[in-house]
Amino acid sequence: MAKQQSRQSGSGEQRPGRRAVLGAAVLGAGTAVVGLPGVARADAKHGHGGYRTLPVPTIVAHRGTSGYRPEHTLGSYQFAFDMGAHVIEQDVVPTKDGHLVCRHENDITATTDVSAHPEFASRKTTKSVDGTSFTGWFTEDFTLAELKTLRAKERIPGTRQRNTLYDGRWDVPTLEEVFQWADKQGRKHGKQIWLHIETKHPTYFRKLGLGLEEPLAKLLRKYGRHKKDAPNFLQSFEPSSIQRLNKLVDAPLVVLLSTAASRPWDFVEAGDPRTVADLIKPDGLKWMASYAQGIGPTLDLVIPKNPDGSLGTPSTLVKDAHAAGLILHPYTMRNENTFLPTNFKKGTDPAAYGDAFGAFKAYFATGIDGIFSDNPDTALLAAADFVNG
């Protein structure tokens, strides 16, 4: 494992100032980013040479620009690219006929207009997914052709009312369509587009005969994204899914980690008593480093919160993970008060923006290699602030 990347580019270039990154965020990657060094790093060579060439801190667009557009739509991904996000995330779930589509969950009740389609009223059902009961409509009960008749919508309209302007504008994309979009943008702008692809509920789907890893590996090979220096990370909350992918492709792999007391669902199914708290100990990190290149912990594992919801003292996770040769891309920073630590909230409106820049600074100071954000433009500016000191 290569040593942790320095905060300068490989050529010794200094990071650009906030004005340069802001220009990239406002004007779009197609014009303002190309040729800029440092934080934006969207030159023609970006993406070649593996994940260690990415800027630090790496800004991962969480489900695209879900702070501004309905999540997991081509519009959300395009806006993330235009802002200059370094990596763009996709979550994948299967359709009834085995196609991989981009949804955060297989329950599409909140993210599509399926409830407005009388022809699918009988598909509404209750299911247990990873031990939790859900009532709604599920991707595995629809063919791709049926799913394509639906339109995407904002998941949390009460918090992000402006995003509802875009309800119905885009459909549910397949992962292959995302690869095609990334290839097109890459050719147009002379760069590779980095993606962060998550297998959702892999044990659940494997039991249904809809295993995720094999069709994902097939698509990765088809689009040349299966190699060691491929411009994408593959991630999952289930370590066994990452171990399976490790045998199928050479692309960089990331184990996602939920709260300390939780257990990955594949551990529950297999009777493995380990919790996330066990996995973030040195022995657990060493075990994950034997098949993965990084971890994606929830931010509370990096800086635990005090009882009042404010940030406490950073844990040793960053130091311990780096000692094991792992990079860290924790999740998720959002601008709204409702999602921020209490010491960074502003005012009493939960949907209003708080002091996101202050929170970013606190997290970057721990030495994390990147961060997931619903607001990549804010994250890019915060990263420039941090790098330029």
Image (cartoon, rainbow, N blue to C red):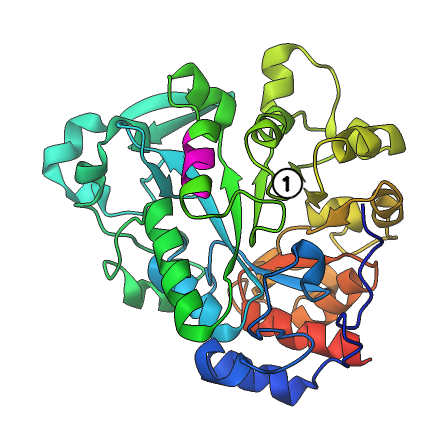
Q: Is residue 82 left or right of residue 142?
A: right
Magenta-colored stretch includes residue 217: yes
Quadrant housing residue 148: top left
SS label for mark 1: strand
**Can you give x and y, in whole percent of width and height, for residue 320 in the image?**
88, 43
**Can you give x and y, in whole percent of width and height, for residue 164 in the image?**
32, 63
Q: Which residues are magenta?
A: 215-220
Q: Foreground: 312 or 172?
A: 172
Disc 1 marks which amino acid? Leu
Q: Is residue 320 left or right of residue 97?
A: right
Name the residue beneath numbered marker 1.
Answer: 253
Can you say which quadrant of the picture contains the N terminus?
A: top right
Q: Is residue 33 left or right of residue 107?
A: right
Count residues near mark 1 (Cα–Cα under 10 Å), then give few for <14, some for 14-19, many for 20+: many
Q: Foreground: 361 or 17?
A: 17
Q: Residue furthest left?
A: 119
Magenta-colored stretch includes residue 76: no
